């Protein structure tokens, strides 16, 4: 992995013992997709683990994730962001989040459309979330063998990131992450500028 790209080991289906083995091998960032699993695993593992929440987050589960996750990758709607900000305020913390953008040609994917996200940013909405640190974008490519389609989708995400950075976050050093790439397409994602890859099956056996 190049030095500019961080590895999040997707541990969402792994027991505590397997995560502990990966930790012993030097891995420190792990990704979970279920709030209850994150809540249950974290107290049983070393305190310096950097937990990333990478799944779709329902609003009624926000309190299980805020303050525990180092980064929430899946802030995928205006309503969710408002409620994340409110919960972080209640907990008196600053919650780091990535904005999920839907670039894949699949209806099952969540996230803002590129145009919708840019339009929302133009309203000044993100400045109204003092308890959130907006750290960048996350997206997933279509699950396909067409590598050129995957590349186009990652390039679209990078283009949206660059537009937002230059126009709305030019002096915000915290807005620096582009989370894209999983086990089947991370090499393309890295080539297209990913700063975080989320890899599970390529690390763990099951």
Image (cartoon, rainbow, N blue to C red):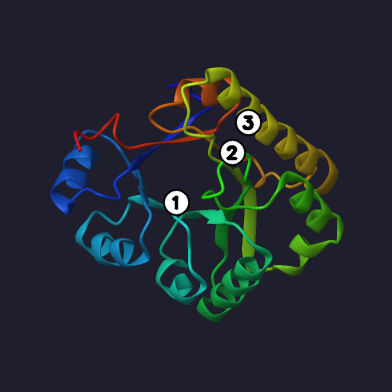
Q: How many marks?
A: 3
Q: Mark 3 highlights which residue?
A: 153
Could you say whether the residue bearing mark 3 is in a helix, strand or loop? helix
Which of pointers 3 and 2 lies earlier in the amino acid sequence?
2
Task: Decide: few, some or many residues near mark 3? Use Cα within 10 Å; few <14, some 14-19, many ≥20.
Answer: many
As rendered, which of 21 and 116 lies closer to the eye? 116
Could you say whether the residue bearing mark 2 is in a helix, strand or loop? loop
- Residue 137's place in the image compared with 134, above or below, is above
Disc 3 + disc 2, Cβ < 8 Å: yes
Q: CA distance from mark 3 to mark 1?
A: 19 Å
Q: Residue 200 vs residue 61: left or right?
A: left
- Residue 29's place in the image compared with 155, above or below, is below
- Residue 70's place in the image compared with 161, above or below, is below
Which of pointers 2 and 1 lies earlier in the amino acid sequence?
1
Q: Position of residue 188 (x, y in %)?
A: 52, 21
Q: Residue 99 vs residue 40: left or right?
A: right
Name the residue located 46 percent from the left edge and 55 percent from the top edge.
70
Q: Which mark is residue 104?
A: 2
Task: Decide: few, some or many residues near mark 1? Use Cα within 10 Å; few <14, some 14-19, many ≥20.
Answer: many
Q: CA distance from mark 3 to mark 2?
A: 7 Å
Q: Mark 1 highlights which residue?
A: 54
């Amino acid at each position: 992995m190049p030095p500019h790209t961080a590895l999040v080991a997707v541990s969402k289906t792994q027991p505590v013992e397997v995560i502990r083995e990966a930790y012993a091998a030097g891995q420190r960032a792990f990704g979970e997709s279920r709030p209850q699993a994150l809540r249950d695993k974290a107290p049983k593992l070393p305190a310096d683990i950097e937990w990333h929440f990478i799944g779709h987050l329902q609003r009624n589960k926000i309190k299980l994730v805020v303050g525990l996750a180092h980064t929430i990758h899946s802030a995928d709607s205006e309503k969710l962001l408002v409620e994340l900000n409110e919960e972080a305020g209640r907990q008196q913390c600053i919650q780091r989040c990535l904005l999920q953008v839907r670039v894949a040609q699949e209806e099952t994917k969540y996230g803002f459309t590129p145009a919708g996200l840019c339009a929302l940013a133009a309203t000044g909405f993100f400045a109204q979330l003092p308890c959130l640190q907006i750290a960048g974008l996350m997206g997933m490519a279509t699950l396909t063998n067409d590598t050129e389609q995957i590349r186009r989708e990652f390039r679209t995400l990078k283009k949206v990131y660059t537009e937002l950075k230059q126009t709305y976050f030019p002096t915000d050093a915290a807005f620096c992450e582009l989370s894209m790439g999983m086990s089947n397409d991370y090499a393309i994602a890295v080539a297209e500028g990913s700063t975080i890859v989320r890899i599970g099956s390529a690390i763990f056996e099951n």
